[in-house]
Image (cartoon, coloured by chain):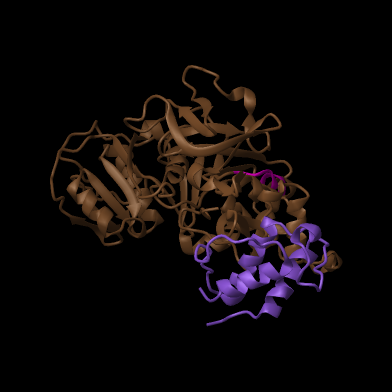
Amino acid sequence: MNELSRAQIRDLMAQVLKNQDKELPADDAAQLREIGFRSLDFSELALRVEDETGEELNFDAPGLRRIATVGDVLDFLVELQHQ
Amino acid sequence: MTVATSRHDAPAPAEPAGVDNRLVVGGAALTWRSLPTPALPGPAAVLAHSAAHALTAARQHAVHGTELLLSTASRVDAAMRTELLEAGFTVSVLDDDGVHPSAPARPRAAEPGRLWLLTSGSTGRPKRVGHTLDTLTTVRVDQPGRTWLCPYAPGTYAWWQVVTLSLTQPGQHLVVVEPDELDDWPSVAAAHGVDAASGTPTFWRRTLYRDADALARVPLRQITLGGEPVDQAILDQLREVFPAARISWIYASSEVGASIVVHDGRAGFPVDWLDRETPGRPTLSVHDDELVVTSPYHGAGLAGPVRTGDRVQVLDGRVLITGRLDSDEINVGGSKVSAGVVRGVLAGHPAVAWARVTGRRAPVLGRMVVAEVVLVPAEPASADTGVPDEAALVRWCADRLSEHAVPRRIRVLTDIPVKETLKSDV
């Protein structure tokens, strides 16, 4: 199965922000609220991961969780690819 | 050879008023009168092998009143064929060798004068809607002489509109293009002096995209759009190529007939047309964002207000028809987005020739707006302006739409997709 690494997902996340003239900090602990990464951006990133891998993500599988930092986003999407 | 077509007597055969109008089919010049006159056992479901065979069946109906459902083999699948045989139709393939009938499963008496349409299927499974030549004829006042292009699939509502015009009015000639000639229609049309053409917005976009110069060589004086939502961008593009032509858009369906005709070159219709009752004219209203039409040209059994399933939005004093109710609305995290409105914004980008907007499953929000576009072929002279990339198109939308309505993923296709009905399912 075609799977993206955490670094590759980070590149895609940077792209989502760059298209809005925003920058992705290097620090995984950076707060999403502070960098202006919102639910629409999160959804876009998930679609970009799907388009890169050609596989659908199973969004329902992992249940709810708190996603507050850049690291949370990356962890979540890495994990989703295993579902 | 003329053969009576029905055991059930139709009125004495009389040729329609347009019988000597010119027909160009597959490059050959004919008239209605010169078409063959095969016997069609009624009630007849005729699967026409080509455009000429479809015209033959239409003329037979006009003369003899044979109960008729006209279509093509590709639009009638095995299930529909069985349904027609069960409903008492003799299903006949009509080709150069004549009529090849299959007997009905439950024979019944024919209903002289009845014409059946199969709806295009954009509403789901095709269904039969009953009409007559009279209810299908919406242009009744004398028209200036025109040579019309007929690009539509035989037996569809739009096809009958062009065909009844030519059958009933002298001076209304037809140039019919077969599906395999469709991409090259401007050269066929220019060669045969076509000065009026009716097509879907997808049909016009494809033509502009493929060869706008060839289109400009067709001496069009009347341009008609219908069958799909009509946005301002396509009207403006056609106006640029044909500054002097009358450009009209028509809202019509098998169910309610031609109900809205707009000639002012703008998308939508004036809001003060709503709820206006004029004898003999359709009444238009809106209920819960849905267009409701009460029409004198309705199909059999469809008197009174008909919910059209089309979604409308009032913007700047105009009522815009944005798309089908069941597919136009995209719910993005609780915000309702009209795919048609987003499509209009994308189509308004100077480099976009065609756009389709849909909802795509996404985390957190449930659905997200995504799009596919076909770009205008790049002209070397304007290379400095560059071809817009996804980010540029997203920014174009972000400047004009609420943030939930902005398509975040925009895929570029290399050609405009089109179905036999000349629609794109946008």
Give the chain letter for brown: B
- Left or right of residue B409, residue A63 in this image: left
Q: x, y (%) of residue B302?
A: 36, 30
Q: Residue at x 65, y 38 (%)?
A: B267
Front-most of B334 and B400? B334
User: Residue B379 is drawn in which quadrant?
Assistant: bottom right
Q: Main secondary structure of the magenta part?
A: helix
Q: Which chain is purple?
A: A
Q: Position of residue B112 (x, y in %)?
A: 24, 34
Query: Does residue B169 appear left or right of residue A73 in this picture?
Result: left
The magenta stretch is: B230-237
Whether residue B95 is in magenta: the answer is no
Examine the image and state in which quarter residue B272 appears.
Answer: top right
In percent of width and height, residue B324 lies at: 51, 44
Residue B217 visible: no
Count of numbered labels shown in the rendering: 0
Residue A12 found in image quarter? bottom right
